[in-house]
Image (spheres, grey):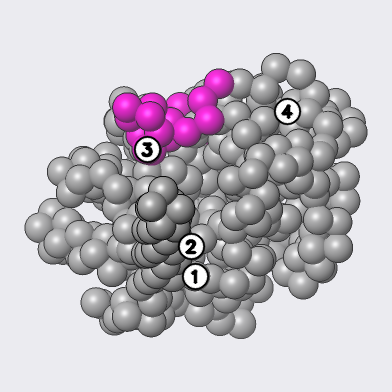
Amino acid sequence: MWQRRLKLTVLTVTCVVSFAMATVIWMWNDRPSVEDIAWPAPPAPGDNRGTVIVTWLGVTTLLFDDGETQILIDGFFSRPTLSDILLRRPVDNDAPMINFAMNEYRMRHLAAIIPVHSHFDHAMDIGEIANRSSASVLGSESSANIARGAGVPEDQIVLAEPGQAYTFGEFEVTLLPSRHAPIGWRGAPPLPGTIDEPLVMPQPVGAMREGGSYAVLIRHPQGTAIVQGSAGFNSEPLEGVSADVVLLGIGGIGTLDIAFAEQFWHALVTSTGAKSVYPIHFDDFTKPFGEVVPWPGFLGDLGEIADWMETFRDRWDEDTALYLPRFGVPIALYEQSSSRT
């Protein structure tokens, strides 16, 4: 009798576990498509070499280029896998991929590498990129310790003074104190804390702590852009700041509520008077570099977030255009298209 009960128990547990695994797999693979967002194509560069262009390279990696000087926001090419993250395995910089990305996107005039904070999906590769260029690493002490761990010379490392302008060619860059999206435990940022000594790779991704977050204000004679790399905000440093373009990190915002998302829009778009908005950080950073796949719907449906943004725009900022960047496709940053979604 007990043997029959044991077999029944084992069979029941097996069925429950199998069903749970199948459900998780289905939910993980139930993803929206970027093709479902019917926004106009971003303005393409013309023949004018001096036009400021920006190229989105996944997550929040952005290459600004005016033909003479390049500014790289973040620089995340190595892409640890989901298994690496969940199992807390040490990960290392992917040297061939870093070499490929820097060559493919012609990073020949890189003057500055600016991580918006020090999580792995923003700052993991900054030291290796700096070692392949003469670019300065501009950011927090935590970002500096990632660079130091990679052996970047100290004279290439600049500890950012919040609110101070730094000049690179015709670009003027100011880091404004901000906040990470409150998507961690009880509204905290994920992986809070600082990196207090040089971080030598390989390391588990959890070793790369936030280290403080910034909104990056990038001024140029042609216009002004704000890069908000995370869906958190600190409205006070943005008071009195105007911008033509906002590149808006929306990672995790779908797990929050629409009221928070509207406050986020107000702080970054309405208050700055931006006329063009580009969402970034909407793609799964566990996918290989170059593969753009939105996060599963249960982690925040990209289509629903796009609907939110259209609602906010129509309610508060009718003249603002919404564009979805395409991976690796240059955008003429200050040439707003006449088409409108």
Report the side of 227 relative to 204 (left or right): left
Report the side of 215 relative to 155 (left or right): left
Tell me which label, 3 or 4, sits earlier in the chain. Answer: 4
Q: CA distance from mark 4 to mark 2?
A: 26 Å
Q: Are marks 2 and 3 in contact (CB under 8 Å)?
A: no
Q: Secondary structure at mark 2?
A: loop
Seen at 76% across and 41% down, the residue is: 90
Residue at numbered disc 4: 144
- Give percent across and percent down for residue 205: 66, 39
| Mark 1: amino acid | Val
| Mark 3: amino acid | Ile
Q: Secondary structure at mark 3?
A: loop
Residue at numbered disc 2: 283
Q: Are marks 3 and 4 in contact (CB under 8 Å)?
A: no
- Residue 261's place in the image compared with 194, above or below, is below
**Closer to us: mark 4 or mark 1?**
1
Residue sitting at the far front:
1
Residue 48 visible, this angle: yes
| Mark 4: amino acid | Ala
Q: CA distance from mark 2 to mark 3?
A: 16 Å
Residue at numbered disc 3: 183
Residue at numbered disc 1: 293
Q: Are marks 1 and 2 in contact (CB under 8 Å)?
A: yes
Q: Is residue 86 magenta?
A: no
Seen at 57% across and 76% down, the residue is: 329
Q: Which residues are magenta?
A: 175-193
Magenta part, dominant SS: loop
- Give percent across and percent down for residue 36: 32, 80
Q: Residues within 10 Å of mark 3 (few under 14, many from 20)?
A: some
Q: Residues within 10 Å of mark 1 (few under 14, many from 20)?
A: some
Tell me which label, 4 or 1, sits earlier in the chain. Answer: 4
Q: CA distance from mark 4 to mark 1?
A: 31 Å
